[in-house]
Structure formats: structure tokens, C-alpha cells
Amino acid sequence: MLLLMTFSVLLSTACCVVYDYGAYDATRDAFLPGRFPDGFSFSTATAAYQIEGAWNASGKGESIWDRFSHTPGKVDRGDTGDVACDSYNKYREDVQLMKNMGLRDYRLSLSWPRIFPDGTLAGGVNQDGVDYYNNVIDELIANGITPMVTLYHWDLPQALQEKYGGWVNETLVEHFNDFATFAFQTFGDRVKNWITFNEPKPVCNKGYETGTRAPGVRDLTLLSAYRCGHTIIKAHARAYHTYDRGFRSSQGGIVGITLNLDWAEPRDPDLPTDVQATDRYMQIYSGWFAHPIYVDGDYPPFIKEGLQQVDLANPGETVPSFSAEDAAYIAGTADFFGLNHYKTRIVTSRDITVGTAGQTFRDTIEATVAPEWPQSASSWLYVVPWGLRRLLKHIKQTYGDPDVYITENGRSDPDVQPPILEDTDRVCYYMTYIDEVLKAIKDDDVKVKSYTAWSFMDNFEWDKGYTERFGLFYVDFTDPNRPRTPKRSAGFYTDIIANNGFPEGADVTKMVNDMWGQCRGSGTAGLHDSNGLLALFFTIIALCTSLKWT
Ligand code: PNW
């Protein structure tokens, strides 16, 4: 009976600043010309497993992604990161391409098992791995490019997975801290921008719940996923304090975490249940990690309630919770807000009974997309530029007006022949999303300090292998030399960097003006649009969908 904790009880949760969803006006989708503030950084990003290859070169240990991709059936087409973009050998060429674009910042990640082959300090350091990263960092700096380094972008040493079960086990807090300490000691004289973790949410939901990504653990009780998140939050805080106490004064760098936050809109902004469901969505999917780190050291209220329900549904198991001491240790452990943004959703409430038929607190929400939002090659990735601006405002309001570093944003094309080098959709994507960032800075006063395009080049897109291409550069994965070819978007991004945005009169600004209608006309306008026909169309779809739900 206790298991039947009802939806209405869960709904009682009140939290957070409620966004003014009604504030739409006709200028939402208009182009705003102008320069970014002085010092604003335009960057690109990659991650070790996605680009390096050399999976077993010179002493490197196995990672969970090596193991996962070598297991038949796990990755589309049987693709692996064994060679990937071969950046282990081609990093000098990559740095030259970046330099030619005028890039002054680059975000990369370290492969933990390339440095600690069995994941532990006691197991020994692989000098070849240290040399490799020293070389990459030196090459970047020699070419005027500032590295931003992510310590963990998903390639856990396989040995730690086997010995401890991976992130569900809090033993990893200390092992991660050893790795972070070694990285600060070894590279911190030159690296001043550190990110502890990239996107812990999919690490836990896909790695330890659905099992669709490494290490492929399937546990639909949610216990493993929330234990994974718990360990990662503690490991992040531990590494932050290590830097703060041991390295900040001598090295003068900054440490943060990169979280992927979605934006959510109520299907009907005038319907309180939709607005509440949207708030739940933001707590569950955007607040899981942000709330403890940027607010009060603890989970958002709706997750805390949800975890009680998970506890009831799993007798004999203990769900994670933070003590007051933990909370004090965790709160405020970031010098900036690292944001990866890809997703906007429309949310409505689902009237279900939590605890029956496998329904969890997360099932009290229905998230959909508007029919007119253009898609990409990734099933989950729709183009909704204004969602980024609203999300940035939400971050300002909810998380203490932090400096925001946008550490990823981008869209995918399919892997087709002939290759898509005239990637107009990606040009439109960057044009509109980057302009939303400009609006957030100029009109909403959000302290956005950088924008990072994902990705510098096509690479190993996790369980999708090489079927989805996010790069500014095309990589031919059938050629042993892995040649890089600039797409049209690389030239466009180069122009934005050179002009620091879209100043009046610049060629890039004229080009954007010319293309704006075409880009927006391809459907980037959206929900609650003032365009009557679109609104009517959307209302009819929404009505049909709601009939289906009832
Ligand atoms: C990020 N979502 O993953 C990762 O940081 C990158 O390594 C990856 O290549 C890139 O985005 C593109 O997928 C995400 O469902 C995966 O919202 C999924 C989502 C967001 C980010």
C-alpha cells in the first residue's frame, strides 16, 4: 500500500523560481546584430575516446568504452574508437587547422586509463600517456590556443568497473581524486581551465540504467543510476577542494563541471498542472547535478521525494542521500557553470500512480517536441534556438547568476554519400544559436563567457558509432589517413570568430541577414509563435495528442 504513493502527493512539491513562460513577443525570432563582449571566447570541443584512437598504444589501459565497443551488438555497425580520428598521431595537424580558423580556445579531455592504466595511482603511471598530453598541451599553447581540459569524458578505466562496479561504488571518489591530483600536478602549470566531469546525467542514465552506453549496466529500479550520480557529485566536490586547497594559489586556474541541461516549456503555459510538470522536468533532468553544486549541496525537492519512492519500492536497499556535512562540502564547488545544451522539450503532466506497474516519479511527466521543429541526424536532437536563451536566463535565476561557459552545442548530419560538406543546416544552427547567446548577454544580462561548438571534427558518436556527424570538419573514416575536410560551417565559424559576432556592416552579418529568413523559415520558429497559421496547426496537433493521452 505504501508503494502506492500517489501522484498528487508528489505534486505537492514546490520549488525553484517559476519561469515567466508567458513572456513571448514578436521579436523572439528576430536577428540581433552586434559584437560579443571583449574577451568572449569562441571554442570547439572534442573528447579523448571520440577522437584519439590508439586504444592500446604504449601501455594504455582498457577503458569501459574499449570493452563496450568491442562487444558485438553494442555500437551501431560494430564501430569502435580503436582508431577514431587518429588524433593520437594527428594532433599537430588538428592544432594547425584550429589555428587557421583563428580559434584561441579548445576543449579536450584526458583518457584516464592512458595515464593510470588500471585506474589507480598505486597501479603506476603510463609515461607515454603523460608525454602525449604534454605534447598536445604544448602544441596548443605554442599556437596561441588555450586548453580547457575535462578530466572525465566517459572513458572509465575498465579495471575500476570490474573491481568496484564503476560509479555506483563510492570507492571511486578517492581514485578519481588521485587522478585529478595527478593531472593538476602534471599539467596545471599550463592548464588553467579544468572541468571535472562531462555530463554525468547520461553517464548514469545510459551507463547504469538503460545500459545503452558503457559500461552497459541495466537497472530499471533507478538505484544504480542515482548511486552513480551520488558518487560523481562527491568525486567532483572532492576534486574541486583538492584544487582549491592545493593548487589554486600557485596555479591560479579555475575548476567547474559540465552539465547537460535541457530547456522545458509547458504545453499550455496557462495550465498550472503543465507548469508544475515542467518544473518537475527541470528539477529531474536539469537540477539533478546543478542543484547540489550550485544551490545547497542537496538534490532538488522533487528528486528527494522521488528517491523516497524508489526506497519504498526496493525493500532492503538504501537510496543515496546527503548529510548536512556532505551538503556543506558540495555546495559552491564550481568556479563557473559549464553548460552543454542540445535539447528543448514541451511538457505536460501525466496522471499516473507512482509505484504501480513499474511507474516511477519520473513518469509523472510527458515530454514531446513541436511538429515544426527541424530534426537532425540524432533522434533526440531538434533545433530550437530560443530554448538556449531561456535556459540561460533560467540558469541565471536559479543557480546564482554564475559565469556560464557553454562547453558544447551543435547538431548532427547523417553519414551519407556524397558527404555533406555544404552543411547549410549546421550554418543555420550556429547562426541562430549563437545569436540567442548574444541576446542572453545583451538583453537578459546573463554572464556567458564562452561558446563552444561541438564538435571540432566528426568523431565517434558513442553507441551511434560514426553514423552521426557533428563536426565542423568532415573526417573520412574509410581512409587510413583520416583526412579532415572543412565543411561550410567551419568557414562560417571562422568568420564569427574573426568578427567576434555579427557587427553591423561586416560581411558575416550581411550573410546572416540574407540567410536568416531561410534558416528560420526551415522551421526554427516554434511554440507560441505569433504566426497565426503555425499556432493553429500546433493547437490542432496538441489537441489530437492530448486526446490520445486521455
Ligand atoms: C554530448 N541529450 O552528449 C557529449 O558530451 C558528447 O560527447 C557527444 O558527442 C555530444 O553531446 C553529441 O551527442 C549528449 O540526449 C548526448 O540531450 C545526449 C544528449 C546530450 C548530450
Image (cartoon, grey):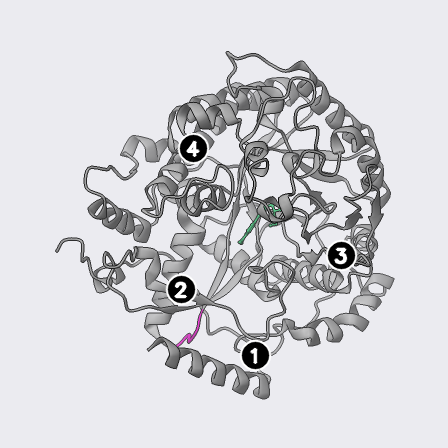
From the top left corner, tell me how far across and down residue 30 is, in percent.
67, 73
| Real-space Cα separation, disc 4 to disc 2, in angstroms | 29 Å
Q: Magenta region's main secondary structure?
A: loop
Q: How much space separates mark 1 and mark 4, taking CA atoms?
A: 43 Å
**Magenta-highlighted residues:** 266-270
Q: Residue 278 carries which label?
A: 2
Q: What residue is shown with label 4?
A: 167
The residue identified by callout 3 is 501
- The residue that disc 1 covers is 529
As shown in the figure, which amino acid type bears the numbered disc 1? Asp
Q: Residue at x 37, y 71 (%)?
A: 274
**For residue 158: magenta?**
no
Q: What element carries label 3?
A: strand
In the foreground, 151 or 366:
366
| Position of 183 relative to 341 (above/below) | above
Which sits earlier in the primary sequence, circle 3 or circle 1? 3
CA–CA distance in space, label 3 to label 1: 26 Å
